[in-house]
Image: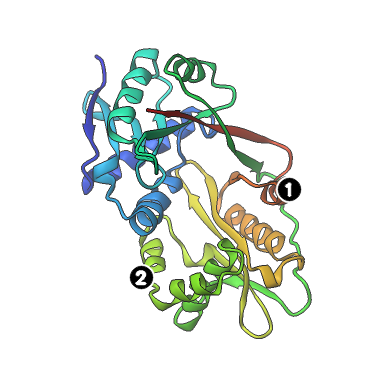
Amino acid sequence: MSPTMRPYAGGADEWRVRAFLRAAYAAHDRRPRSWHVARFDYTRWHVALNVAEVRLEDVAFVWEADGEPVALLLPDGGPGEAHLSVHPRWRSAALEAEMLDVAQARLTGARDDGRRRLVVWAMADDAERQAQLLRRGYARTGVAERVWRRGLEAPVEATAPADGYIVRSLGDGLELLERCYASGLGFHDGDIRQAVENRDDPTWYRNVQTAPLYRRDLDLVAVAPDGAIGAFATFWFDDVTRSALVEPVATVPAHRRHGLARAVLTEGLRRVRRMGADLASVGGYGEAANALYRSVMGEAHDVVEGWSRHW
């Protein structure tokens, strides 16, 4: 039976898709050839809902066989890119070609010059997908995500932050507002206006906290003596695949070079290990982020590359 495509439907479909992603991730030896279920949660409850302001029902597509999902196509946010997750038992050139056809028809983004653009992501060692993309006129964008992974069979040594800082779980109330403020500073190079905007309406962070895998005890912050949040890292633990994903990680510019990011990362690894995780992963794009992750996670990593085409 050939898989058949339909739009993602939300509701109960969310749980069916999450079960598929767990099965596919495990079948791929827990490598990023398909999405970790936590990445779906984060996209569903933050990147799509808060950032791109789109419904997954409008940008996600499911392929089924015998009534069960076997492949998923969606952007990490809004139109303009495509991520393909396929269970290895069902992967074929024909299925991937059909998924790319749907992506080109339904997920392209508009450029300033009126042309259409689509970025498709592929593992650097995925010769089959790369060949498909080359035949269609795609080229590497030069942007790649390095997905670092660390086994957690052995104990993780804690890293102490600079004197005066404390690493702990995120609080509520006013500290939630401080976390929103720190996110604006950490991801926008200290932009006060962005930080204030983040803090003025914390609904976006409440949305993140609604995600099924979100746990307050794994939402870690490094707090300065004056109560300011200097760094943060959120861990997402999936007990089905016994794996954890870290997203997001950032340090506020004024608090950098105090060992805060390393401290929150090692504390998070220690916590998920106690919960039963035997693998953790985190993705980085920039040189500084990847240097940090290499130092904490070790050398093992995969490379996922962006390929683009313009019409």
Name the residue beneath numbered marker 1. Answer: 291
Seen in the picture, residue 72 relative to 202 is either above or below; the reply is above
Seen in the picture, residue 194 relative to 88 is either above or below; the reply is below
Q: Nearer the viewer, residue 241 or 224?
A: 224
Q: Nearer the viewer, residue 5 or 138?
A: 138
Q: Nearer the viewer, residue 5 or 307?
A: 307
Residue shown at 28% from the left, 34% from the top? 106
Q: Kindly report the distance in space between the C-alpha atoms of the residues bearing marks 1 and 2.
A: 33 Å
Q: Is residue 206 left or right of residue 128?
A: left
Image spot of residue 59 (x, y percent): 29, 41
Seen in the picture, residue 88 relative to 159 is either above or below; the reply is above
Q: Is residue 180 left or right of residue 295?
A: left
Residue type (three-letter) at the residue carrying disc 1 = Ala
Image spot of residue 282 (x, y percent): 59, 47
Q: Quadrant of residue 160?
A: bottom right
Residue 70 seen in render? no
Residue 203: numbered disc: 2
Mark toward the start of the polypeptide (1 vs 2): 2
Residue shown at 47% from the left, 41% from the top? 36
Q: Is residue 183 left or right of residue 173?
A: right
Residue shown at 45% from the left, 71% from the top? 198
